[in-house]
Image: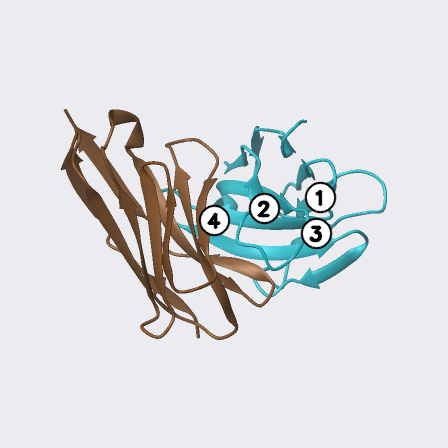
Amino acid sequence: GQSLEQPSEVTAVEGAIVQINCTYQTSGFYGLSWYQQHDGGAPTFLSYNALDGLEETGRFSSFLSRSDSYGYLLLQELQMKDSASYFCAVYNTDKLIFGTGTRLQVFP
Amino acid sequence: NAGVMQNPRHLVRRRGQEARLRCSPMKGHSHVYWYRQLPEEGLKFMVYLQKENIIDESGMPKERFSAEFPKEGPSILRIQQVVRGDSAAYFCASSPTTLTGELFFGEGSRLTVL
């Protein structure tokens, strides 16, 4: 079977750094993606790791360790607008399989 | 360059009626995916289509649900004889190629079954 686990909720204050972890069990793994979704909105792509290591895109970074079946999303210099749900997703054979999401609340 | 277009954005149906959800992928994208999302939950894969072909329908319920992506026109997700449990947001996504972790999502169609 396939499963992805991530924390259900994370809270932080503006300006802080937060890390959202994701562990997965799947066959046919090609890579790990991260998506952001605001309430009532569409999921939007943040990053994709096909190889081990850290990918940095502005305030957001994503890490993958294929041997540990583990990845994380790192958000720096948090802003109020970062309050949203964050989903990890495994690229499996021909489709993305999403985790259940982590709700991030940023407080002033 | 228009994004993924879904319509209707909101749809209300009574139990037993049919729901048709449409999705036009981004220009140049030939791969379409449908996902279902219940409130406070993740996105559940339903079906992956290319023009005129269903590639992977492993997430589709065996009955009442069907999808197509004709040579001309949008992709359509069809739900027959809707039940209250079908109430959800249905998202369509597209990509230009396979083997990429980047999907472009539409704003979703929110189905409410009374």
Residue identifier under label 1: B29
Q: Which amino acid type is marked by label 1?
A: His
Q: Which amino acid type is marked by label 3?
A: Ala
* Discs 1/2, front: 1
Residue identifier under label 3: B67
Q: Tell me the element at label 4.
A: helix
Q: Are marks 1 and 3 on the same chain?
A: yes
- In the rendered image of this protein, does residue B105 appear above or below residue B69? above
Chain coloured brown: which letter? Answer: A
* Discs 3/2, front: 3
C-alpha span from label 1 to label 3: 17 Å
- Badge 4 sits on which subunit? B
Residue identifier under label 4: B85
Q: Tell me the element at label 1.
A: loop
Mark sitting earlier along the chain (3/2): 3
Query: Could you tell me if residue A98 is visible in this image?
Result: yes
C-alpha span from label 3 to label 2: 15 Å
- Badge 2 sits on which subunit? B
Q: Tell me the element at label 3.
A: strand
Mark sitting earlier along the chain (1/4): 1
